[in-house]
Image (tube, rainbow, N blue to C red):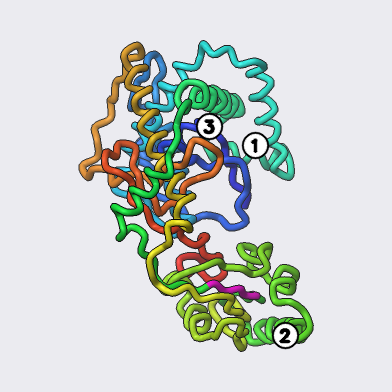
Amino acid sequence: MKHLRYTAWAGVLACLGFVLICSSGCKKKAPEAPLARGLQAGGDEIVARVGDYEITGKELARTAHSYAQKLMMQGRRPPPGYEDSILDVMIKSELLYQSGKDLGIPDLSQKVETMYKEMVGQFPSEQAFAEALGQEGMTPQELRERIKKDVVVNEVLEKKVYQGIAVTDDEVAAFYRDNPASFERPEMIRARHILIGFAPAATEEQKKASREKMDKVKERLAKEDFAAVAKDVSEDPGSAPQGGDLGFFPQGQMDPIFEKAAWSLATGQTSDLVETRFGYHLIQLEERRPAGIVPLEEAKEKLAEALKGRKASEKVEEYCQKVRLEVPVQKLRAPAEIPPAGLPALPVPSASPVPDAVPVSPEAEAAPSFSPPPPPPPSSAVSPGQS
């Protein structure tokens, strides 16, 4: 099923540690996240006011639900009290938007309409788009208004907030030197696989048909490159476009049967037929990476991005505090009993995100910890957390 993803407030939400569901479809439906309390309660109550703008429980619930879905698609659960952190982010987003109303962005309406049409074009029909929009509880006009805010907020960030953000080589080296434990990584392997799937309730006859398909795959592998064959025939949508490449992963991340087979291989070796609840696999071990400390040269680029992200967060906070002097803010929602555990990592003030392994919350005071970038989310065809 294709999900509607919109770009509302993308700039500030990315800067403060999470991104709303935005502009593309999912081949696999995400696990349902628990609805936020505002939506469960009907969503008509006002949870915050920023100047004359009122944030409703429904709006908070929609944003919190989207954030929770994003995490659950990655096999994670939202932290306790995350709704309160998200409300704080929404307040800052509105402050940024209201501070940008005087920018006079050329052709703003045209930009909004272009982005809106691009979103419609991602769906097979306007009816499919309308259905997806309805599932998000939004009207076309509400979506256009959110896109408009996104455009304005990004202009504010680029023109009024992000100017002058830089990280020196000395800062990167100092953080690396002072935080050695943050650069430890476990042993990992990198593998490819080819999947010929069958349903959990498949009959022996259906399994036999899958085995026969895999026999033909084996014949091709005797003459052709594993990655090329995987790209052509693998039925795992998560890895097939990359030639079956699953990236590096540590023990404990994949389906136990799949993992046992993969870790038992020698580098360059291809497994015999492996059966999991997803179907039949052939696995090729690409590389082993021993446990150890990530070298500075390897960590430097992503660490610099993480440190830029922290500076970006600090500048957003400073800017919003100044805007608050002119735009009153009133939070009407009581904080959750359990304090928020923080949001995921901050990206840099450019298009490239910081890996989730750099956990900086919106209100963080301490320097961000750093860990080597995690492997890509496990393929849905081998991850134990999905079916």
Q: Is residue 72 visible?
A: yes
| Main secondary structure found in the magenta portion | strand
- Residue 93 position by quadrant: top left
Q: Which residues are magenta?
A: 190-194
Q: Nearer the viewer, residue 8 or 126?
A: 8
Q: Compared with residue 340, is residue 71 higher up or lower down, i.e. above or below?
A: below
Q: Secondary structure at mark 3?
A: loop
Query: Which badge, 3 or 2, is on the more N-terminal residue?
Result: 3
Q: Secondary structure at mark 2?
A: helix
The span from disc 3 to disc 1 (Cα, nearest Å) is: 17 Å
* Residue type indicated by callout 2: Lys
Q: Nearer the viewer, residue 381 or 364?
A: 364
The span from disc 3 to disc 2 (Cα, nearest Å) is: 47 Å
Q: Which mark is residue 39?
A: none
* Residue type indicated by callout 1: Ala
Q: Is residue 35 visible?
A: no
Residue 43: % across, % down = 39, 32
Residue 229: % across, % down = 74, 74
Q: Which mark is residue 130?
A: 1
The span from disc 2 to disc 1 (Cα, nearest Å) is: 45 Å
Residue 36 on the magenta segment: no
* Residue type indicated by callout 3: Ala
Q: Which mark is residue 8?
A: 3
* Closer to the eye: label 2 or 1: 2
Query: Which badge, 2 or 1, is on the more N-terminal residue?
Result: 1
Is disc 3 surrounded by few (<14), some (14 to 19) or many (20+) residues within 10 Å? many
- Residue 278 position by quadrant: bottom right
Name the residue that disc number 2 marks. Answer: 218
Extreme-left residue of the structure: 337
Q: Compared with residue 58, is residue 380 higher up or lower down, i.e. above or below?
A: below
Instruction: Report whether 52 appears left or right of 4.
Output: left
